[in-house]
Image (tube, rainbow, N blue to C red):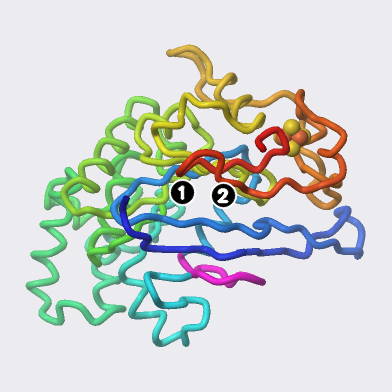
Amino acid sequence: MRETLLRANNLSKSYKVKTHPLSVQKKILWAVNGVNLEIRRGELLGLVGESGCGKSTLGRLLLLLEQPDKGEIWWEDICLTTLKPRQLKSWRRFCQPIFQDPFASLNPRQTIKQILEEPLLVHGILKDKRKRERKIVRILREVGLPAKVKDVYPHELSGGQRQRVAIARALILEPMFIVADEPTSALDVSVQAQIVNLLLDIQIQKGITYLFISHNLSLTALIADRIAVMYLGRIIEIMERKHFKSDHHPYTHALWQAIPAFGKKVEATVAGEPPNPLSLPKGCVFHPRCPEKKKICTQEVPMLKEITPGHFVACHLFG
Ligand code: SF4
């Protein structure tokens, strides 16, 4: 088995939100709630779940783009959550994000060369200007773009080209870990496969570890070594590829069932609406939508348990 690169221990993040747009009263919303997760060196771990379940918040926490309220993040034997800002800065070059919307994540006032040069300047890498330029051209070629792209602005590129630039910006610091947050969902269907293939090629060439965040279970199952399923801020199942056809948590089962036939809309949906995250139900938070619920489900929160080696499920149905 691959060794652990990154580990989240009991990670939680909350926000204060208004109970009503006109109200001054605020309640606590737990976007990430007691998450334990290991990410193994060189793997592609898929993180799936419906919109608003906390996937992106968890991705930002793992990159320390946001501070958790509780819990720890370990990078090998270093506890990142206790590092000082200066120590974190040198770690950051090894961990990079790729966001959903390349247009929003690229500065429209900078040329592609300036966008790609900025991380090198921030981290004091390649002080020689000509070496930086050569590196930029090389990285553009690696993501399938011609050298002349360095002189244009983001608005002069197509959506797919802009996402290639966003990938180049993540790669230029030679990271070991990338959080790709819905990297294809803002793109045309015809371009999505190209971007996914590019990410996979890069993983093979450079041995990068990915957290691939997606609402698209069918796509994630095609490319992931393991999948973690999130529901209302919690991880409710973690499985390896060999478990994809096993029995699942009822929510995961519903996600699999909801995958439409080839050629149709690919977003999986589950019957019923998630409960109000500001007033979660007692016991298992999935019980209002669960066709399998029992009495205990309305009273006790199920813990994540290993039901077979490498397959973890948080459900009272699994002994
Ligand atoms: Fe359904 Fe109960 Fe399992 Fe929750 S714990 S998923 S309600 S069977």
The verdict on label 1 being within 8 Å of ligand 1 is no
Q: Earlier in the sequence, mark 2 or mark 1?
A: 2
Q: Amino acid at mark 2?
A: Lys
* Residue 183 horizontal/vertical position (percent): 41, 44
Q: Is residue 64 left or right of residue 142?
A: right
Q: Is residue 72 magenta?
A: yes
In the drawing, what numbered circle is on residue 55? Answer: 2
Q: Residue at x 49, y 32 (%)?
A: 216
Disc nearest the viewer among 2 and 1: 2
Q: Residue at x 61, y 70 (%)?
A: 71
Q: Is residue 117 left or right of residue 18?
A: left
Give the overall secondary structure of the magenta segment: loop
* Residue 206 horizontal/vertical position (percent): 19, 54
Residues in magenta, as a range: 63-73
Q: Is residue 211 magenta?
A: no
Q: Residues within 10 Å of mark 2 (few under 14, many from 20)?
A: many
Q: Residue at x 42, y 41 (%)?
A: 226
SS at badge 2? helix
SS at badge 1? strand
Give the residue at mark 1: 181
Report if the CB atoms under discs 2 and 1 are less than 8 Å apart. Answer: yes
Residue 242 falls in image quadrant: top left
